[in-house]
Amino acid sequence: MRHGILFVVSAPSGTGKTTVVEELVGAVPDLVMSRSYTSRVPREGEVDGVDYHFIGPEVFEEMLAAGEFLESATVFGHRYGTSVGDTENYLGQGQDVVLVIDVQGAEQIKQQNSEMTSIFVMPPSFEELEKRLRGRSGSGAIEADLRWRLDTARREIEVRGRYDYIVVNDDVKECVDSLRCIVLAERSRARAMKSEGSAIAGSFIHDQMKST
Ligand code: 5GP
């Protein structure tokens, strides 16, 4: 069985990365979105084990000390991490996995020389990102939090060149289409096609032996 492909998607807060990745995994078979672990408390409507594994700060640090995270980072004051075990399980079963993580986490995985395909999703403009962030938090938008996210976004987009692909989320459908094309192209890389290619090549040898 083929080993799955690891995809990493990063984007500034408010770009809509969760929406596009959820649509992507709904549209492509054998592609799953990894569920991160976090120290933060669930927001209204968030469900433990669905949106995140909400584990609290103590358990988070225990898991970190035990080497259970492939990567981890502090983002907007909270701890986030990707489980090595969960990721390996999916990949070992031949499932492709998408990690939706921040730029610090993506850089950690890159430094480990792990094979991965990284994608940076950009908003169409700074103004549009600000509009989306204001719309998301409604009229109760806390100005300081908004500034924090926009300042972070400014820094994050500077590292876009470290990623394999850059996709703009202007129109959700077009963005999902682009992501889908990337996943399908990566699946057709010769290294990803190794076992399937060998199986097909094997049938040629088998057939040749029958005919001689
Ligand atoms: P939120 O709490 O708003 O869902 O996510 C805040 C930020 O944390 C997002 O930019 C998201 O990409 C990032 N994030 C979520 N899970 C992880 C993770 O497991 N690792 C890292 N490094 N960042 C994460």
Image (cartoon, rainbow, N blue to C red):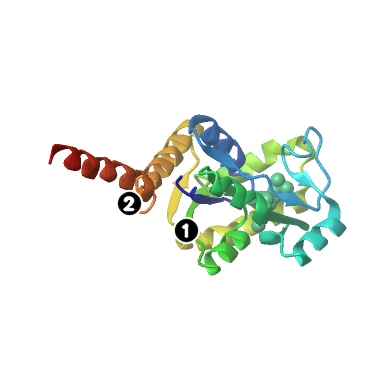
| Three-letter code, disc 2 | Ala
Visible residue check, residue 76 = no
Q: Is residue 173 left or right of residue 49?
A: left
Rendering coords of residue 86 (x, y %): 65, 49
Residue 184 horizontal side relative to residue 91, left or right: left
Neighbourhood count class around disc 2 (C-alpha, 10 Å): few under 14, some 14–19, many 20 upward: few
Judged by depth in the image, the label closer to the viewer, 2 or 1, is 2
Q: Is residue 87 above or below residue 136?
A: below
- The image shows a total of numbered marks equal to 2
Q: Amino acid at mark 1?
A: Tyr
Specify whether tag 2 is near ligand 1 (CB below 8 Å): no
- The residue lying toward the viewer, choosing from 145 and 109, is 109
| Tag 1 residue | 163
The residue located at (38%, 48%) in the rendering is 195
Q: Secondary structure at mark 2?
A: loop
Percent of width and height locating residue 112:
55, 68
- Residue designated by label 2: 190
Q: Residue furthest right?
A: 58
Residue name at image x 81 percent, y 62 percent:
61
Q: Going by the image, does 32 lie left or right of 28?
A: right
Beta carbon of the mark 1 residue lies under 8 A of ligand 1: no
For image coordinates 47% across by 31% down, the residue present is 173
Percent position of residue 68, x then y: 71, 60
Secondary element type, mark 1: loop
- Earlier in the chain: of badge 2 and badge 1, it is 1
Image quadrant of residue 154? bottom right
